[in-house]
Amino acid sequence: MAAAAPQDPSCSRCDRRSACNCSHGSFPRVPSVPASARSLDLSCNNITAVTDGDLADLKLLTALNLRANGLASTPSAFDSLWILEDLDLSDNQLTALNPRWFRTLGALQRLHLLNNPYSCLGSPVFQDLVRLRTLAFGGPALEELKRRDLLGVNQLDELAVHANNLARYESGALANIWPLRHVTMKVHGPVLDNPAMVSALLADVSYPDTHLTLEDLLLVGNRSVLPLAEAAKRRIRQMTIRNVSFTDEAFVEMLVIMSGVPLTYLAMDDITLNANGQWGRAGWTDHRSIDEFFARNIVVVDVFKFMSLSDMTFLMKYPRKVSVINAGVFVIPCRTSRLLINLQYLDLSDNLLTDLTLAESLCDGGATLQLLRVLNVSGNALQSLPTISQLVASHSKLTHLDISRNGFNFMPPRCHWPPSLRHLNISGAKLSAATSCLPPSLQVLDLSHNGLRTFSLPLPVLTELHLSGNKLLRLPDGQLFPHLMVLHLQSNTLSQFSASELLRFRRLQSLGAAGNRFVCSCDFVAFLQSVLRGGGAARLTDDEDAYTCDSPLGLQGAPVARVRLPVAACHAVLLVSACCGVALLLGTLAGALLWRLNAFWYLRMTWAWLRAKRSSRRRGEPRGDPAAEALLPYDAFVSYSERDAAWVENLLVPELEEPPSLRPRRADVLQDAHQDVLQDAHQDVLQDVLQDVLQAGATPLRLCLHKRDFLPGRWILDNIVSAMERSRRTVFVLSESFVQSDWCRYELDFSHFWLLDGAAGRDAAILVLLEPLSKDDVPKRFCKLRRLMSSTTYLEWPRDEDRRADFWDSLRDALRRDGRR
């Protein structure tokens, strides 16, 4: 079985500008990236070959970086890249260059072929690159340059040739390239072995407007400096010497060669001085054209033997700009400073200056360097801010002062600054507070990378404020800076800022606030997304993905521009209000429906009934057991309206409790019985008499009336339920007044529940219609009573007096049914 083909690697590190950074990914071949990629960085991988199809889909690619891979050839790999503008093939294994590789790259503008093992360019390689403006080629293996090698290359802005081991150069090989703004040459070996070849090389690329950079030189005598004469003849104006080792003899010879040349800019970078500074022998030379001198990373091998520069008046009195950076300078004697009579710009950054030695260099603030406009002493060992302010106070033209990256940890309340000061940089110090020491004349202030928690100083003419890398919790008050246009607050501890805070900055145009600990609330996310879309007056200078959430935890690290918060989280009040409104509406509808269906009545009665039943259980009153029911104290509970009280009290109660028709007869019978007992003492006579009395209906009934039998001080509902529980029957005296009475309706309600109680008999309720009343007059919720009126015969109070005796007999029978006789 054949082995499966390895899966093509992929790279997803592409930003929103379609720039894909796939460097340092250990890719063995070109990974797949989106076809929309505009820029692809494949540097520092393990790609040994680029095949025809690897880049076929990337037709929109404008920049391709294949530096530091193991490429040996690229046959037709770039044929589809018609709009490619930038190609880097440096630091690979290309042993030969083939013009076929570049035949379709008509839009190419920048091509880098440095440090590949080809010894020559060969046949015309670049003749199809008509738009080429930057070309860098050569390396340790380059040995030969011929005229035809660069055929077709006529216009370049920048040219870099690494030819440290160049052995053969055909004069005129680079002569047709013009104009050249910047030429970089590495000619270490030829300078030592073949100065004449270097002279020919420099003669072909030196023009007055060309910035010439020479690298990797070892200038140890007069002969090694001679090639510079060709550049001097072309009257170059700008020259940089980088990674060069000088002796006194070579440096003096260079000054002699460049004498009278209109050189305005001289830079010396990464310089090693094997010298004592004995350059006074070139005092007669003319270097009045030098306007700017730049020196960086200078190492003096024997610093203790290096002489003072006091004899260098012929060099020092002309420059207006001097930079001596990272050169181990710990002091410039005051007499040397006095030589810089035209100096306007002085950069002594990253040296060893202290408060005392700076005072010596500035002549204790005396009348020296009076033309100085810019002073940069950043990255030294300064500690006293008041001392610095006093030293520069007399420099009436000083506008820019950079004292950043020093050891200031305290700002006094008052300082003396020159009134001309406009730009002040105190970043990278240890300040914990800003005071009125800051001059009100400032237009640009940089206090980045300190320990500030607040900043509330009024600076009326300030236009730029840099406060990145502090501990600010909120934006400064914009009203303190009426002219502020640029504000940088990156990497503080801001949690939020709002539109109202930005509006206080009336002229703010640019804002940088990335890298803060933003709390992504709904208001802040909506506001910042609006600003990122250009909706605010101020433009955010940082990339939009640099604004990330720190909280809530679920959004930590997410770019604010891509956050989508749920509606429930952002509009909680509105949502709750809507829900409450809907709930209220539904509740109202449900309440109306329940009211229509008498549900509230059922609930109210259920609760009252349960409460009353619980009370009855506590009282232990019996109900439902026939033996116990016979012991109940009342034959009936009478429920009636107050308007029917006269009928109940005058007719019902006397008739049932003391029937008038039985009173005389009962008295006579009892009297006769008493006499018979006394005279004859016969037991059977007494028994006959009592039986006669019972048959005559003389046994009275006991009724429960609310006026008479309810316990005072007790809950009325407890009284009603208790009365029903202690009565064998309930008599309802029904009338129109009864239906309208609230308490009668309660008694009807409890009767309704009582009838539903399994312990109650089906004849527990007796209906007496005092006046004509149909079942429809009874409320519909009393469905049991309505059915009872339909299915049970009820007693109707007769209007005819002759029929009332039968009414009373029927009522007595109903009350005594299944009871006592």
Image (tube, rainbow, N blue to C red):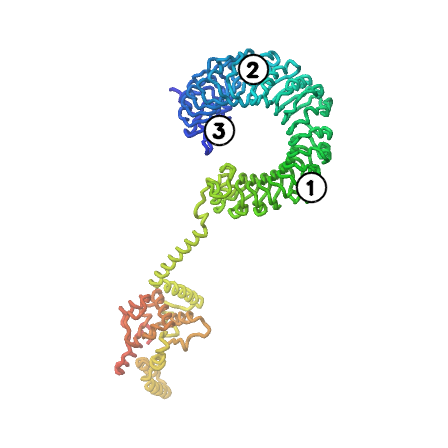
Name the residue type under label 2: Leu
Whether residue 657 is visible: no
Q: CA distance from mark 3 to mark 1?
A: 50 Å
Viewer-closest of 295 and 747: 295
Q: Which mark is residue 21?
A: 3
Viewer-closest of 250 and 96: 250
CA neighbours of label 1 inside 10 A, class few (<14), some (14 to 19), many (20+): some
Q: Secondary structure at mark 1?
A: loop
| Residue denoted by label 2 | 201
The quarter of the image holding the N terminus is top left
Q: Nearer the viewer, mark 3 or mark 1?
A: 1
Q: Is residue 701 above or below residue 477?
A: below
Quarter of the image for residue 782 reads bottom left
| First-in-chain label (2 vs 3) | 3
- Quick check: 526 left or right of 803? right
Q: Which mark is residue 416?
A: 1
| First-in-chain label (3 vs 1) | 3
- Quick check: 462 left or right of 635? right
- Quick check: 513 left or right of 305? left
